[in-house]
């Protein structure tokens, strides 16, 4: 029986349920020292003298490391990905990308609140914090700039003094005659929409521990990272050490959502301290540090215009976007370019003009957060389409339906170059059907009937497409042990996505063994020589196909050896439940483990030249990305006098290709949607004008709770991807892409008779009340 | 007390076993459990009482262990996630419900939820929907979106109500 | 986020506690449930030299009806204990209903009624409830005991009418007169959050006590919803604008009064 498409219960649960998980802070390293950082209290300041004498005098304090020391030993950090621009991207959009290296610890200036300035290593975290309080640092405050548009205006304070302005990235694109289309249009709408800044905030913060082997000086690092191999390579380069003598392990990781990418200054500083002191060193980020200094997400403003004919056919879209990168342009084009390639989403639009400018500001760096530029794109285009529908007096869902790419148009070339330099082509999917199915729910249930004079009901839509499964590659090694157990080693790691189960299902399927007999090992740079990691909805596509391929290769190998052992031809053999059998000869069977056993060098009867183990490795390099899609429908109630918005129902109709484990997929979607709902209604990172963080704790940065969970309805339409052997598509981020737009649309719909326009979130009671009052009074 | 600021022995019962370890007054119970007693199943996500990852049962009541000093737990009886399995080592009913309903992803928040729900169902086996939401909204989860956690809680409640 | 060092005392009697608190040479603070104090200490926003923990003082652990029918709540009584007591739910339904809005079960299990009053977050429920119910707060100090009416107890943000060396030992909530009705309403960001703004209302045959909270530096006692708009002095913060709080205070006050009157039987 196939295990694909079955909700196999998760293998990873048992340990976690017993409290036997091993997260970085759970590790007990003998004699480990602990770290606390002095972080910048200023958004922008010159650093003067640092006096550590009092801190060093405190018993239990082992070292204070500041920028003077690290500057001498560590090159400032730059990430290759920030500088890589494929030739085709360069030709299509002529991007100007400026990157300034990030010092592990700054020597001259600090450029955001929370930036690490000095590091105290002590016998305990309590003592380390005591010592931080005793450090005397002279700061000379400088003018700061917080808002991206203000940062780009002439005369703004400069974040990077060596640049003449704050523009880190700009690129532009035009397809078709945009001006002509606007001139010919019957209807034009134009608005500004803001995707406000949010914080991923997994419940486990970041954490790093490092130890040096006293025998051979090799470096062991444990990190709550999404990308252990990348971190290893990064450490090798920045610490100037042989990558073979660095082992990075990501043990259990408590959620990531983009924030635990490598590499932060702390990722470098903890191993640096361990090497310098010759002792194990550990740092567990606390929530205050996390909210101030871990990367944040979103923060884009779009000035978007849509031109349509009288029937609501979209003739052209023009969008000028500005993004806030925070103090460092860490990852270059990744987020802003994603916004560009996902802006038109599922719509068949004639002409398209797009321009993006990215500014550095005196705020925490912005990096991919679940969706990575896509929710921002979807918020802009979907809000604009809602405006268009109002302008036309048409049903917003009808206007969408009118403009969707049809299944008969697949594969559909967008005429855009994707971030990896390939032509953007939607490989498969049926967007009109997704919309139809999602609409059915809303029409069936007639939510509007529950509306009262005071409590208004609204329905809002968001449709998105998502390029998933980016390369460059992932590795997998599948080995059958003489016991018959199957070991799957992969470069992909897990932060809760259930990869141990899903990848085990794929290996079990390819090999003909029970899922329970498969053990997946990931998140260890020593498990496979190279790997990439888990981000950008890629693991199932890339690692999944790698595992499947490697397992298929082992199967072939096993059958070949078994054929000799059983005196049959390999094509006569089959494997089921871990047993190899000869078709038509019920007595001729062999456990899979026996084949592995047969190959061990201990076996005198082993044929010469045979491999010494039953194992195979695969490096899967995907081609162009494969496209998932989804329709989100939010049904909300808005209480007029108090402005309280309640999400009553959230419908997701989605297509993520062939589904391996439906329960895990549903869990990912609902989790993503809830993050999106949090962003739509509650969560916002706020800085004041001087760049002081106002949302530095969980009372002020407001995550949703079980009390805010709506009823969900999930609809699956699984069009297999033609681009990979398994037919899978990624889906880790999709849930978070639609909710801000769908909820904004629903709130606007609920307040339609007042003529309310939602330009931004989060739609907390106070902002919604402001909208109502402004509309009623104006 | 000779030295009110110095380390002293804290004696308490955790999961039915008497434990003794040293603590200075400021040591948080969460750190005491995790780093002095090696019970790392209790997690720490905020250290200001909001996320609930550190929830333990202290004399039968659910509390944030990050808001209790270890010295305050002198003589107390504690239960942590490590003490939720049955005597036979099998997962307890609340743990099973989370597994069966896929009420967990990364599992970092899970111990806190298990404890909060255990506390509720021990006091009110037939807890209402409102009571379930009240108890669970004191714990944050960033992965699951709560829908499956609520489903697990309902299943565990139905079982508890049946047993009661 | 680890607290700074402090001296820890867990006296067994109130007298010892008062002696410790009365020592002017040391800056000590009462540690009750710790649900507000410990977060501040973990952020090192509070750095007391010494804590005087009430946990061993049995004489402060009570929840009882006094001779005059008032509910007497000792300083060690937790919010959870209050909610569990059927006599409170029956006799002081406004108090019961309001306290269900305080945080979560995991917070109420330790947070004390008196600690919440002494802490006086103007967005907290208990100060408003005390005011609406006409509570008196008994404090003890080096010069003995005194009783302070709720009207006089809450001064400003996190500030109450306690003198140095004094602590709260009891809160007394008079029994609502026969034939009275009540209502409690608040708007919070999430389930269990402090109120953005809220109203506690008691309508008794002889008097109407309407309390608006979260809309000034302390809860405000008013006689009529018509006074709300002029009386409030709301804050602008990242959770809500001042104007929002003003409008919603007016709205909730009207609703609450109507509901309380209805419950009072007309
Ligand atoms: C996640 C979370 C959510 C919360 N939500 C809410 C909410 O919605 N509404 C709400 O009102 N509260 C809320 N709280 C706070 C909670 O109610 C606290 O319990 C309460 O404010 C303080 O009571 P405590 O006993 O914990 O006092 P402690 O924290 O021990 O003390 C608080 C302050 O009062 C002083 N103090 C305490 N007792 C006395 C006394 N007897 N005499 C003199 N001084 C004393 C202390 O010295 C300290 O300065 C929340 C707390 C958390 C962690
Ligand atoms: S760590 Fe204790 S509540 Fe978050
Ligand atoms: S399962 Fe990851 S935080 Fe809840």
Image (cartoon, coloured by chain):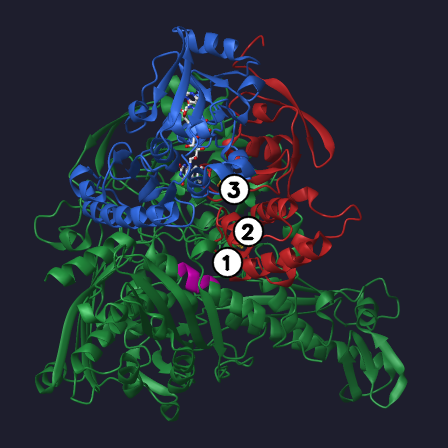
Q: Is residue A672 magenta?
A: yes
Task: Tell me the quarter of the image containing the N terminus of chain B.
Answer: top right
At which x and y percent is residue C165?
A: 39, 11
Residue that carries the numbered disc 2 in the rendered image = A250
At which x and y percent is residue A324?
A: 24, 55
Q: Residue furthest bottom?
A: A408
Q: Give the label, 1 or 3, closer to the camera.
A: 3
Q: Going 14% across and 84% down the picture, which residue do you hit?
A: A177
Cα–Cα span, label 1 and label 3: 18 Å
Residue that carries the numbered disc 1 in the rendered image = B146
Q: Nearer the viewer, residue C143 or A335?
A: C143
Q: Is residue A12 visible?
A: no
In which quarter of the view is residue C135 placed? top left
Q: Give the left or right position of residue A269, taking residue A357 as reference.
A: right
Mainly helix, strand or loop, the magenta region? Answer: helix
Cα–Cα span, label 2 and label 1: 25 Å
Instruction: Chain C: give its colour.
Output: blue
Give the answer, above or below, for where A157 lies relative to A639: above
At which x and y percent is residue C88?
A: 50, 36
Does ligand 1 reach within 8 Å of label 3's beta carbon? no
Mark sitting on residue C105? 3
Instruction: Chain A: give its colour.
Output: green
Q: Which chain is red?
A: B
Q: Secondary structure at mark 3?
A: helix
Q: Nearer the viewer, residue A491 or B86?
A: B86
Q: Are marks 1 and 3 on the same chain?
A: no
Q: Chain of mark 3?
A: C
In which quarter of the view is residue A190 placed? bottom left
Q: Is residue A488 magenta?
A: no
Query: What stretch of residues is rendered in magenta?
Result: A671-675
């Amino acid at each position: 029986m196939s295990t694909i498409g079955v909700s196999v219960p998760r293998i990873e649960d048992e340990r976690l349920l017993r409290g036997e998980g091993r997260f970085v802070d759970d590790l007990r390293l003998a004699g480990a020292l602990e770290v606390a950082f002095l972080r910048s209290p200023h958004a922008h300041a010159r650093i003067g003298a640092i006096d550590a004498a009092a801190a060093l005098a405190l018993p239990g304090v082992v070292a204070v490391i500041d920028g003077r020391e690290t500057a001498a030993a560590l090159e400032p950090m730059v990430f290759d990905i920030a500088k890589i621009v494929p030739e085709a991207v360069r030709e299509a959009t002529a991007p100007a990308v400026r990157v300034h290296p990030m010092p592990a610890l700054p020597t001259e200036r600090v450029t955001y609140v929370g930036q690490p300035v000095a590091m105290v290593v002590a016998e305990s975290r309590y003592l380390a914090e005591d010592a931080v309080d005793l450090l005397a640092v002279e700061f000379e405050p400088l003018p700061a700039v917080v808002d991206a548009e203000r940062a780009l205006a002439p005369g703004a304070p400069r974040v990077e003094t060596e640049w003449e302005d704050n523009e880190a990235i700009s690129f532009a694109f035009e397809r078709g005659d945009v001006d002509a289309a606007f001139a010919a249009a019957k209807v034009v709408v134009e608005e500004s929409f803001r995707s406000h800044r949010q914080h991923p905030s997994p419940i486990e913060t970041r954490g790093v521990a490092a130890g040096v082997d006293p025998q051979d000086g090799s470096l062991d690092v444990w990190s709550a990272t999404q990308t252990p191999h990348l971190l290893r390579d990064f450490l090798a380069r920045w610490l100037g050490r042989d990558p073979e003598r660095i082992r990075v392990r990501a043990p259990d990781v408590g959620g990531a959502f983009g924030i635990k990418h490598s590499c932060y200054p702390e990722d470098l500083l903890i191993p640096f301290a361990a090497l310098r002191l010759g002792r194990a060193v550990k740092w567990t980020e606390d929530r205050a540090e996390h909210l101030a200094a871990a990367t944040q997400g979103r923060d884009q403003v779009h000035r978007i215009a849509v031109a349509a004919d009288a029937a609501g056919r979209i003739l052209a879209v023009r969008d000028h976007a500005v993004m806030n990168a925070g103090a460092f342009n860490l990852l270059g084009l990744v987020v802003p370019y994603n916004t560009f390639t996902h802006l038109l989403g599922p719509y068949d639009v004639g002409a398209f003009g797009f321009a993006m400018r990215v500014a550095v500001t005196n705020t925490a760096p912005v990096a991919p957060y679940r969706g990575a530029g896509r929710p921002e794109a979807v918020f802009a285009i979907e809000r604009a389409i809602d405006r268009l529908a109002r302008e036309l007096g048409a049903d917003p869902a009808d206007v969408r339906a009118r403009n969707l790419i049809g299944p008969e148009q697949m594969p559909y070339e967008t005429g855009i170059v994707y971030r990896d330099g390939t032509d953007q082509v939607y490989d498969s999917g049926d967007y009109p059907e997704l919309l139809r199915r999602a609409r059915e729910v809303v029409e069936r249930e007639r939510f509007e009937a529950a509306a009262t004079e005071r409590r208004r009901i609204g329905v809002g839509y968001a449709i998105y497409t998502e390029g998933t499964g980016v390369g460059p590659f992932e590795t997998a090694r599948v080995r059958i042990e003489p016991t018959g157990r199957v070991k799957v080693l992969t470069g992909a790691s897990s932060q809760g996505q259930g990869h141990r189960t899903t990848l085990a299902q794929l290996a079990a399927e390819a090999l003909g063994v029970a899922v329970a007999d498969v053990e997946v090992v990931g998140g260890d740079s020593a498990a496979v020589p190279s790997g990439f990691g888990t981000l950008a909805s890629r693991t199932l596509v890339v690692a999944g196909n790698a595992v499947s391929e490697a397992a298929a290769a082992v199967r072939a190998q096993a059958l070949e050896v078994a054929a000799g052992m059983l005196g049959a031809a390999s094509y006569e053999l089959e494997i089921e439940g871990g047993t190899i059998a000869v078709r038509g000869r019920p007595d001729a069977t062999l456990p899979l483990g026996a084949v592995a056993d047969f190959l061990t060098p201990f076996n005198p009867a082993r044929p010469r030249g045979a491999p010494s183990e039953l194992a195979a490795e695969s490096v899967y390099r995907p081609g162009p990305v494969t496209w998932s899609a989804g329709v989100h429908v939010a049904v909300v109630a808005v209480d007029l006098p108090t402005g309280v918005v309640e999400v009553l129902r959230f419908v997701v109709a989605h297509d993520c290709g062939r589904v391996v484990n439906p329960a895990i997929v549903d869990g990912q979607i609902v989790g993503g949607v809830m993050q999106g709902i949090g962003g739509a209604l509650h969560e916002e990172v706020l800085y004041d004008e001087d760049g002081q963080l106002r949302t530095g704790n969980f009372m002020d940065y407001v995550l949703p709770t079980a009390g805010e969970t709506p009823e969900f309805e999930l609809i699956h339409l699984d069009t297999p991807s033609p681009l990979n052997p398994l037919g899978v598509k990624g889906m880790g981020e999709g849930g978070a892409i639609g909710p801000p737009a769908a909820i904004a649309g629903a709130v606007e719909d609920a307040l339609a008779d007042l003529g309310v326009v939602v330009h931004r979130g989060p739609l907390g009671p106070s902002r919604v009340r402001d909208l109502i009052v402004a509309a009623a009074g104006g | 007390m000779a030295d009110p600021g110095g380390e002293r022995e804290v004696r308490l019962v955790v999961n039915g076993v008497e434990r003794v370890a040293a603590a200075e007054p400021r040591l948080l119970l969460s750190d005491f459990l995790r780093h002095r007693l090696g019970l790392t199943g209790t997690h720490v996500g905020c250290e200001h009482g909001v996320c609930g990852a550190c929830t333990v049962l202290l004399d039968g009541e659910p509390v944030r262990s990050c808001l209790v000093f270890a010295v305050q737990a002198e003589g107390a009886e504690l239960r942590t996630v490590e003490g939720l399995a049955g005597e036979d080592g099998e997962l307890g009913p609340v743990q099973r419900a989370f597994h069966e309903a896929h009420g967990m992803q990364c599992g970092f928040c899970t111990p806190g939820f298990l404890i909060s729900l255990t506390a509720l169902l021990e006091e009110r086996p037939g807890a209402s929907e409102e009571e379930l939401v009240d108890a669970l909204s004191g714990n944050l989860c960033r992965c699951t979106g709560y829908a499956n956690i609520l489903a697990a809680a309902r299943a565990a409640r139905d079982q508890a109500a049946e047993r009661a | 986020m680890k607290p700074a060092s402090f001296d820890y005392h867990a006296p067994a009697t109130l007298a010892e506690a008062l002696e410790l608190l009365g020592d002017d040479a040391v800056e000590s603070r009462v540690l009750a449930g710790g649900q507000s104090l410990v977060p501040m200490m973990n952020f090192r926003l509070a750095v007391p030299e010494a804590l005087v923990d009430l946990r061993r003082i049995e004489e402060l652990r009570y929840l009882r009806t006094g001779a005059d029918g008032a509910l007497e709540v000792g300083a060690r009584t937790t919010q959870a204990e209050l909610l569990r007591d059927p006599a409170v739910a029956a006799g002081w339904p406004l108090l019961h209903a309001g306290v269900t809005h305080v945080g979560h079960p995991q917070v109420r299990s330790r947070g004390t009624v008196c600690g919440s009053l002494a802490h006086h977050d103007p967005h907290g429920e208990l100060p408003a409830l005390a005011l609406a119910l006409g509570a008196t707060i008994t404090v003890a100090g080096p010069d003995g005991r005194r009783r302070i009416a709720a009207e006089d107890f809450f001064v400003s943000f996190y500030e109450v009418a306690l003198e140095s060396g004094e602590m709260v030992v009891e809160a007394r909530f008079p029994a609502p007169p026969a034939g009275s009705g009540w209502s409690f309403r608040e708007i919070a960001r999430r389930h269990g959050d402090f109120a953005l703004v809220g109203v506690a209302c008691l309508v008794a045959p002889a008097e109407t006590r309407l309390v608006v909270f979260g809309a000034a530096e302390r809860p405000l006692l008013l006689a009529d919803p018509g006074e709300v708009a002029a009386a409030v002095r709301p804050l602008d913060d990242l959770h809500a604008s001042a104007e929002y709080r003003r409008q919603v205070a007016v709205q909730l006050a009207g609703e609450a009064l109507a509901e309380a009157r209805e419950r009072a039987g007309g």
